[in-house]
Amino acid sequence: MNGREERLHTREVVHIYRIYFPESDKCYIGQTIDLKRRMKEHLVKEHKSLIHRAFNKYDEWEVTPLHVCYSHDDANRIEIEEIRNFDSIHPNGYNLTRGGEGCDTFTNNPNKEGMRAKQSAARKAYFTNPENRTKLSDSMKALGDMHPSKRADLREAHSERMRGEGNSFYGKKHTDVTKQRISNANKGRVDSEETRVKKSESKIGKKNSFYGKKHNAESLVKMSESTDVTGEKNPFYGKKHSDKSILKMCIAQTKRQLARLEARLPTEI
């Protein structure tokens, strides 16, 4: 239970307050059950927030209590109204959200797309860094047989959780926009020769997780059913390739044939 939910049950008094900075002529609207503690958080803890940066930049500021609320819903409603009244959403003020979200500074953030892009770039930079990749690899190897991927009980439990309605994507479909994004992200992505060799070696002989095992009859039936794409199960059932698609496939096939032919030709004649 978070702080705002606790107030709903304990009937604590909630204060709606305004912090105004005369030099920038901008303000921040917030809600709290302890204004003194909340001010300390603004000044000390929230080092990345706009309001914290404003405190560091400007010497003069004013704190004004605006309302006293006795319910969770009233506090959220009035906070939203006052943020709108004072027009304190960034860049006109120091609020990052429209209020009432229970500290969710992302969902309605006007700079959401920029934040998402920065987070994505930071993650990509981290995981493409050779040093970080080596550290992650070493930490996984150190687990040995205790690694989750090597424990049959954990694998089975995870598989069970992800089946049917337990899967978070159950009954959903990717939109055309999402499909295009996935397609664009995977285009041109080719593993280096070193990576391909490592992947191959990791699955040879005893290193293969299925080494020395055999599929039972039930598993074979399930695999057969899951890969059955005959008749109406085929996603292309009842459809036809357009002339443009047929031409593209012919060109691609011709290129592959030429590549195989060139590979067989002697380098010197």
Image (cartoon, rainbow, N blue to C red):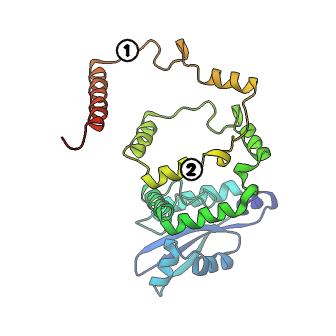
Mark 2 and mark 1 in contact (Cβ < 8 Å)? Answer: no
Residue 124: % across, % down: 47, 59
Name the residue rendered at 67%, 79% in the picture.
Answer: 36
Q: Quadrant of residue 164?
A: top right
Q: Earlier in the sequence, mark 1 or mark 2?
A: 2
Q: Which mark is residue 225?
A: none
Side of 25 where 12 appears, left or right: right
Residue that numbered label 2 is attached to: 201
Q: Specify few, some or many for label 2: CA neighbours under 10 Å numbering under 14, 14-19, or 20 or more.
A: few
Residue 178 against residue 75 in the figure, above or below = above
Q: Give the camera-side residue of 248 and 178.
A: 248
Q: Circle 1 — which element?
A: loop
Q: Quadrant of the N terminus?
A: bottom right
Q: Residue furthest left?
A: 269
Residue 179: % across, % down: 45, 36
Instruction: Residue type at mark 1: give it.
Output: Lys
Instruction: Residue type at mark 2: give it.
Output: Glu
Q: Specify few, some or many for label 1: CA neighbours under 10 Å numbering under 14, 14-19, or 20 or more.
A: few
CA–CA distance in space, label 1 to label 2? 41 Å
Name the residue rendered at 31%, 25% in the picture.
Answer: 249
Residue 117: % across, % down: 43, 57
Residue 25 against residue 214 in the figure, above or below = below
Residue that numbered label 1 is attached to: 240
Q: Quadrant of residue 187?
A: top left
Side of 81 where 41 appears, left or right: right
